[in-house]
Each structure stands twice: as C-alpha cells, then as structure tokens.
Image (cartoon, grey):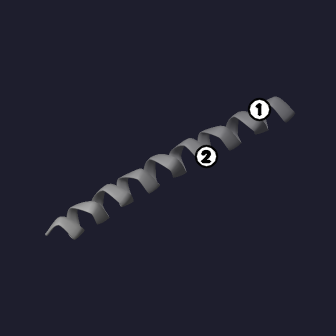
C-alpha cells in the first residue's frame, strides 16, 4: 500500500518535472527565435 502511494507521488513528480522542462525549452526557443 505505501509503495503504491510512493509510486503515484513519483509519477506526479515526473509529470511536473516534464512540464517544467517543456516550458523551459519553449522559453529557450523564444529567446533564440
């Protein structure tokens, strides 16, 4: 049970990190454009 919750938290963290990375790349593209 605890492991499942931890897995969900890890998944959420991954999604947040991915969103931040995408935003960062988009910002870099804007700067270079």
Which of label 1 and label 2 is nearer to you? Answer: 2
The image's mark for residue 22 is 2
Left or right of 31 in this view: 10: left
Residue 3: which quarter of the image?
bottom left
The percent position of residue 11, horizontal first and vertical second, equals 37, 60
The percent position of residue 25, horizontal first and vertical second, equals 69, 43
- Quadrant of the rendering where the N terminus is positioned: bottom left
**Residue visible at 22% across and 68% down in the picture:** 4
Q: Badges 1 and 2: C-beta atoms under 8 Å apart? A: no
Residue 10: which quarter of the image?
bottom left
Indicate whether 23 appears above or below 11.
above
Left or right of 33 in this view: 8: left
The residue sitting at the top extreme is 31
**Residue visible at 53% across and 51% down in the picture:** 18
Indicate whether 12 appears above or below 7.
above
- Which residue matches tag 1? 30
CA–CA distance between discs 1 and 2? Answer: 12 Å
The percent position of residue 21, horizontal first and vertical second, equals 61, 46
């Amino acid at each position: 049970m605890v492991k499942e919750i931890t897995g969900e938290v890890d998944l959420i963290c991954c999604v947040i990190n991915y969103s931040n990375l995408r935003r960062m790349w988009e910002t870099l593209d804007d700067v270079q454009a």
